[in-house]
Image: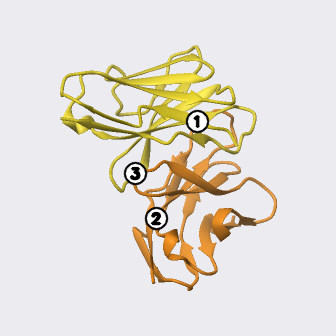
Amino acid sequence: AQSVAQPEDQVNVAEGNPLTVKCTYSVSGNPYLFWYVQYPNRGLQFLLKYITGDNLVKGSYGFEAEFNKSQTSFHLKKPSALVSDSALYFCAVRSNQAGTALIFGKGTTLSVSS
Amino acid sequence: GAVVSQHPSRVICKSGTSVKIECRSLDFQATTMFWYRQFPKKSLMLMATSNEGSKATYEQGVEKDKFLINHASLTLSTLTVTSAHPEDSSFYICSADSGRALNEQFFGPGTRLTVL
């Protein structure tokens, strides 16, 4: 069975500091990994994905994530946080079979203070 | 990118009534659509997988007679919450998979259901 763990309910950082939102996964076979962001009362916005290739993936709004197969992790990072980055972040995984659903982590609330 | 719409975006209904939520892929054909439910500040829980022209596959614990899913065409799936109760109040989000790109699903903006 596939699963995703986001160990932190909330991450607090000061504006301008680097941020990391953690994610570990469990899936059979090669995983497809995703990060989404959700603002209050809004749908999901796609940030980035890892399918294959370079372990460091760059996405929208200056975010990046590093795929680490040995640690089964896919942490989301940004070198310099903005107050506007404050939102709910979801890590998700799916298998490489067509027509399979995304399985989401519980979400991590990022709060960036000015 | 591909666009998925949901209608209505917000609905308030009385307990005991039924509510239909539509999910449409606007510029691609979706062989598979998924319905998720999200409680406030919580994760998205997969409710069911819907394939065009066939019965939906429901996740364990989801009542198929309460949450009716129809995927009659390659661009439309509907979720009907039958005999709604206050505990059905939630944010419902659909996503669509074209089957061509195996690495991304496209999400609708969500529907906020409030049952009084």
Residue that mark 1 sits on:
B4
Query: In what element is the residue under mark 3?
Result: loop
Q: Quadrant of residue B59?
A: top left
Q: What amino acid is at disc 1?
A: Val
Q: What amino acid is at disc 2?
A: Ala
Q: What amino acid is at disc 3?
A: Asn
Residue that mark 2 sits on:
A87
Q: What color is chain A drawn in?
A: orange
Q: Residue at x 52, y 23 (%)?
A: B77
**Where B53 falls versus B84 (above or below)?**
above
Q: Give a yes or no on whether discs 1 and 2 share a subunit.
A: no
Query: In what element is the residue under mark 1?
Result: strand
Q: Is residue A63 visible?
A: no
Residue that mark 3 sits on:
A41
Question: Which of B32/B8 is in front?
Answer: B8
Q: Chain of mark 3?
A: A
Q: Earlier in the sequence, mark 2 or mark 3?
A: 3
Real-space Cα distance between discs 2 and 3? 11 Å
Which chain appears yellow?
B
Q: Position of residue B78 (x, y in %)?
A: 46, 23
Q: Quadrant of residue B3?
A: top right
Q: Residue at x 46, y 64 (%)?
A: A87
Q: Residue at x 33, y 52 (%)?
A: B40
Q: Quadrant of the N terminus of chain B?
A: top right
